[in-house]
Amino acid sequence: MNLLLLSQDLMISARVTGAARQHGLRVITVTDHNNAIVAAADENSRILLVDLRLPGLNIGALVGAVRDCREEHLPIVACGPHVHEARLAAAREAGCDAVVTRGQFDREAEAILKEVTNGSNS
């Protein structure tokens, strides 16, 4: 099973990999909107983690496209710096399953992944 990471930041990748292993997930990193949608359509994908700092990201369009490409719900977690209030708000408005600051994710990654993956299994 895969955790998709939409990011160009190598630092977040290391943190995500550690948390994903705790849930038996393999991290697949994609660096743009189109590749994220293709990867999200794969039935082995179990969660999509979006780095809100990704240049040119339209979180509303991404969430809509991911929701349209699958019959089964794919949990989407968005994370970004606490100072990017507008991006965090846009992710909430777009319907992400969880929206957290980068600091929250760094401290609570395992718990956040557990919460959203358990919610998708019920």
Image: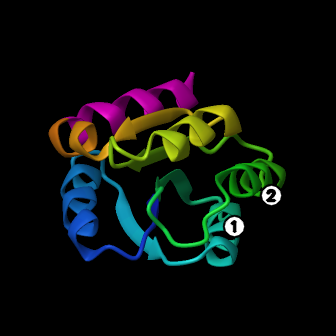
Amino acid carrying label 2: it is Cys
When the figure is inspected, residue 22 is found, relative to residue 39, above or below; the finding is: above
- Residue 82 lies in the magenta-colored region: no
Q: Horizontal placement of 86 versus 109: left or right?
A: right
Q: Report the quarter where the C terminus lies.
A: top right
Position of residue 115 measured from the top left corner of the image (x, y, whole percent): 39, 27
Position of residue 35 measured from the top left corner of the image (x, y, whole percent): 63, 77
When the figure is inspected, residue 25 is found, relative to residue 6, above or below; the finding is: above
Q: Horizontal placement of 16 versus 27: left or right?
A: left
The residue depicted at 27 percent of the width and 42 percent of the height is 105
The residue depicted at 43 percent of the width and 69 percent of the height is 7
When the figure is inspected, residue 117 is found, relative to residue 67, above or below; the finding is: above
Q: Which residue is mark 1?
A: 37
> The residue tagged with tag 2: helix, strand or loop?
loop
When the figure is inspected, residue 114 is found, relative to residue 19, above or below; the finding is: above
Which image quadrant is residue 91 in?
A: top right
Q: Which residue is mark 2?
A: 69
Which image quadrant is residue 75 in?
A: top right
- Mark 1 or 2, nearer chain start: 1
Q: Number of numbered discs present?
A: 2
Position of residue 63 measured from the top left corner of the image (x, y, whole percent): 70, 50
The crowding category of the residue bearing disc 1, from other C-alpha atoms within 10 Å (few below 14, some 14 to 19, many at least 20), is many
Position of residue 28 measured from the top left corner of the image (x, y, whole percent): 43, 71
Q: Are marks 1 and 2 in contact (CB under 8 Å)?
A: yes
Span highlighted in magenta in the image: 108-122
Q: Nearer the viewer, residue 100 or 118?
A: 100
